[in-house]
């Protein structure tokens, strides 16, 4: 059985990745590419790598203006690859018309509108949506996603950090505070708009930290660790220092996480907790050695490893920021919301 | 309906690419990974990026020793990703047992064993195989491939060059001699074995020509242009100077081809010939602008463009060397040989 | 003895390269960094890699507004790293005040103002300057540069092409027409302003041709071959098709040049002509093997090699586009103009 | 005044960097290139980028066999770019003959031979040398280096870590234990021999941690922090977890260091301590913003920044691993040992 879906804001890197995933998908079909531009482009003019490939499977490459009623008539679900503020406008309009929504922006990720406003620099204006949105870290929210009408697709850095840490926090194997997340991302994570520091001769052969302790994903990571990281007092504390770095690669995130192990905790205890938590999970691999970026690029996989060394827990997680960190997890969530097999369209 | 296939020599880059393609394939199923090593490895130990992904679709990640009888019992087709000489041994053994073969080595590409011996430095020892092998440049050999039992999968550089030039030669729009093919390939084309000039600090930020006029693909290109490039005297002449360069990228080939246009030939004439030749072709895009490497990476597409400028025809073609230049075209050919839709498993 | 110089427009990549060269220079001293901006920046704020390094040798890192009189009082020579049109304004103003000028823009490279206007899209407005400017391809213009007051520093692509071809044309070893220059440059050649196609995720792992036959360096190359390439009728003809490509590296140019050898010409004849022409030249190496980009990066060297293969002359030249292709050759020229040893400050 | 020096083991990346530095040096002159190979190569055959550049300054490009007497006759100092064990043989032989030695291997860095044996997997066999060797972290050992006959040139990672941490430890601003050094290095740090994980297609677009807590530089870092990091009880404790990562770049090291600030310590306190410690230092820049790799590549600079955020001290240091992390600091030390200005030959 086939479901028709819309992609709103398809001209960024997450839009492209989503289209490529859906071109391989056996049961979802792109019905509408909705653009906020005055003159919606052909998507294959934006991305020549799509030339001929949409038509070959009967998809119209012409983007159209966003029309909620028209989408509601034709589509059962919409992926929103829009700016945060635009998402808050379009999500409720679509939901009201019965269209399910997977939102790839940060609009519905933070439970507290005040935290949102502090991180993103503008007020939140869809408090109602916030209340019923489900945070779609799929492996840890499967049942809620299945019945959700609005899924807040997690951020890329938080996806890697939470996947690595949740089982260890739940098992009480590492301290809930004082966690350090030293992360590195490829440049596609910064979007498709040219900027001086992302100009090729500047980013090439370079490496640097940015947003040290003040990155927008810092509160999302802490919230996720609090909410999904277990503990008797229902996640009241959980603190992490998040320090991202910019890597001279196109895609991929690798996070090296330092935590304080509980007394007596060994490498094997950490690894067992991870293996147990992710037994049978198709998109999480608990590896015996250190994950690398290349091993997860162009896949929806999370690779994770943990060890105790010199008295520290060192936990490493790798994902493709555009796939498991964005469009892949979005498809994974949509699959659940629409009753498809969770892994359709994903590698 | 499902067909079971074997991959012999799966531990190189073309093997990995083939596996990834077959993991997405709706009707081909990997039944056997055959290794020439004394101790066949687990393929997910060789390539950790495959961790868990084979088991998820019921494929055994353990490589086994190559056993022709065992393969014949379980598989209808084998992909050979072996060294040239090994291919000449295993192909006839499998064919004799009724297993169809797509050979990704150069063993069966050159019609004349003497030309083969000169290019590859050793005698050809399967003349019988040479006689019935079909050169699998799919778009130009579809019917022959469909009924073939042994397909010689074309080389990466020749695939791009021939796709670009054949329609122009057939239409008599450019001279058959004096063609210059200035090509550039990513490093994966040189295989997975470390070598001094492919050591990261040597290949990174570098660019250079190699094998100038003496590369092994030179005779393959000339043979293909002669055989498939039309002309009354059945391809008696056709000469090209082939100059490859090594690009600091992992994958992709871009060829800039210089030819002498026939008198009065315009850009539009070249483009029309290409558009006509490839109308309806799912894996060839005739572009109005210059192709780029990125646009074809991780796809089975050929992007091609041609123009007349300053009295020269300048024709540009781009492919992914590991996909259309190797494993993708191999799947495309296998699909035809097994009666599947040509595009299954390919993007 | 020490000479004080000015750099006007120091905030681009050629400006930075020039500063780094002059920091190592035993007899030239940066006296003034002149910026066209309303609020001239500190150069070490623009380029943090200069932090502390100017002060260490007594150079003021603060850029100042361009003031011709002030420059004339303090400096004997100015390097112009300005836009083409700005160069035509500042060069005559400085020359009038007795300041020698090395202009790194294209303003004074093309002898014919009509050709200039066609290539650069605006009228030339310093015809007087054009008349006495010396085209500073140092190895072929040493004496004229020595006595010049205004040197037009050659373009990056033309420097490599001309260095490779001039000796062969002069010796009559290759045809003066029908030359094909297939060139590839690092991204720094496109300047420091961010552009969509130079955004890291677009340029990385990519390769493509651009400006095919219509690049601004096409007429400069043809003019140089005509003027410096010898021949009885004083360079009346000389035609070349110039096809540049964009490489995913920061710096360096490699040109693979295809030409028709005169009857009977051998590899050895080509190599002998090159060796003879460049015997004793400190910045030209005639190599027996194919030059590579890495071997010339961060040096003022030209590496060149030539061979006859399959009836074609294939000539390869490599330079660093920011050094021999811009700031290095500018220092080389300035050294001659000021009576320093030609190689001071250069590696 | 000119000093003649030898380079033993010049065919690796540190050898090349040393040669390039000495080619620019006003008072040191390469007199001997000593190779341990049976057939010593020409250095310009090993590194074509040196073609013609040694002869231009009167240096013989031919490597010679290592002959201690011959070196002693001609050279006042030798740089050892040899394997650790070879260094222990050649250093005493040269010292005995009156030749000063800067050893770039790890042979003389660790004070305790047992620690050395544990880290490097073989016994130390020059205990006498160990006793008088001076650890050449120049800025913190200037006087001792000046009078040293044998300098142990520090490791690349330890140079960055120690430069960043010593002033903060001495001032008591951060805890001496529990320090985490999350570091990333370009591939040249792994040497010039090809290895599977350094093969271009493997290292490109990749990033991963290695040697987590077990890297050979771990004891060197801890020893340096103990010895040079001050404290009343003369550096008895000081513990750090060192986690290096491999970056897809050719050169450069960036270290992000996490430490526990003493109560009440602010960003300004950290920065003041660094500024004070390095006031007037030509090769250390205390930056207000986060250092980047590009800003130090091809220079002998250390860029450092520190801040307190979310209760942690985050200190970032960047160097070029081949310059300040190896050959540049070696020249800096040699300059002191020979009475030259410390900065000669260095940028």
Image (cartoon, coloured by chain):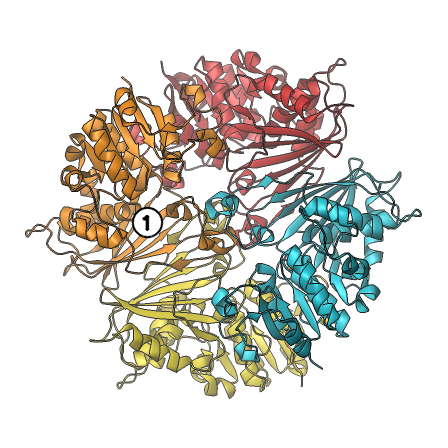
Chain colours: A orange, B red, C cyan, D yellow
Chain letter of mark 1 equals A
Q: Seen from this angle, which residue lies furthest right?
A: C232
Q: Is residue B136 left or right of residue D112?
A: right
Q: Residues within 10 Å of mark 1 (few under 14, many from 20)?
A: some
* Image x and y of residue D128, in percent: 45, 83
* Image x and y of residue D131, in percent: 43, 83
Image quarter in which the N terminus of chain D is found: bottom right
Q: Which residue is mark 1?
A: A289
**Residue B265's quadrant in the figure?**
top right
Residue for point 25% across, 74% down: D175
Q: Secondary structure at mark 1?
A: loop
Image quarter in which the C terminus of chain D is found: bottom right
Q: Is residue D23 visible?
A: no
Position of residue D312 relative to residue A157, above or below, is below
Q: Is residue A38 left or right of residue C247?
A: left
**Viewer-nearest residue: D297 or C99:** C99
Q: Seen from this angle, which residue lies furthest left?
A: A232
Q: Is residue B293 visible?
A: yes
Position of residue A123 relative to residue D216, above or below, is above
**Viewer-nearest residue: C296 or B325:** C296
Q: Is residue A200 left or right of residue A146?
A: right
**Viewer-nearest residue: C291 or D288:** D288
* Image x and y of residue D237, in percent: 26, 77
* Image x and y of residue A42, in percent: 45, 29
Position of residue B174 relative to residue D89, above or below, is above
């Amino acid at each position: 059985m086939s479901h028709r879906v819309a992609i709103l804001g398809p001209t960024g890197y997450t839009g492209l990745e989503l289209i490529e995933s859906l071109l391989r998908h056996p049961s979802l079909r792109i019905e509408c590419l909705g653009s906020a531009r005055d003159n919606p482009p052909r998507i294959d003019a934006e991305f020549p790598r799509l030339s001929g490939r949409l038509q070959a499977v009967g998809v119209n490459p012409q983007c159209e203006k966003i029309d909620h009623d028209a989408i509601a008539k034709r589509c059962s679900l919409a992926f929103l690859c829009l700016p945060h503020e635009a998402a808050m406008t379009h999500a409720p309009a679509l939901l009201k018309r019965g269209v399910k929504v997977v939102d790839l922006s940060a609009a519905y990720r933070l439970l507290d509108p005040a935290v949102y406003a502090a991180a993103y620099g503008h007020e939140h204006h869809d408090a109602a949506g916030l209340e019923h949105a489900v945070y779609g870290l799929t492996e840890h929210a499967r049942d809620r996603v299945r019945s959700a009408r609005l899924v807040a697709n997690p951020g890329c850095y938080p996806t890697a950090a939470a996947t690595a840490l949740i089982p260890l926090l739940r098992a009480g194997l590492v301290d809930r505070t004082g966690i350090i997340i030293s992360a590195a991302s490829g440049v596609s994570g910064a979007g498709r708009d040219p900027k001086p520091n992302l100009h090729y001769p500047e980013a090439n052969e370079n490496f640097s930290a940015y947003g040290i302790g003040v990155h927008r994903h810092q509160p999302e990571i802490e919230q996720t660790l609090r909410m999904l990281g277990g503990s008797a007092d229902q996640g009241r504390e959980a603190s992490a220092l998040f320090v991202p770095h910019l890597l001279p690669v196109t895609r991929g995130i690798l996070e090296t996480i330092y935590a304080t192990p509980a007394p007596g905790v060994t490498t094997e205890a950490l690894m067992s907790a991870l293996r147990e938590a992710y037994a049978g999970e198709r998109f999480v691999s608990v590896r015996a050695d250190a994950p690398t970026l290349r091993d997860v690029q162009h896949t929806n996989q999370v690779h994770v490893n943990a060890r105790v060394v010199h008295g520290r827990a060192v936990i490493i997680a790798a994902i493709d920021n555009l796939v498991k960190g964005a469009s892949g997890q979005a498809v994974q969530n949509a699959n659940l919301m629409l009753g498809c097999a969770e892994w359709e369209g994903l590698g």
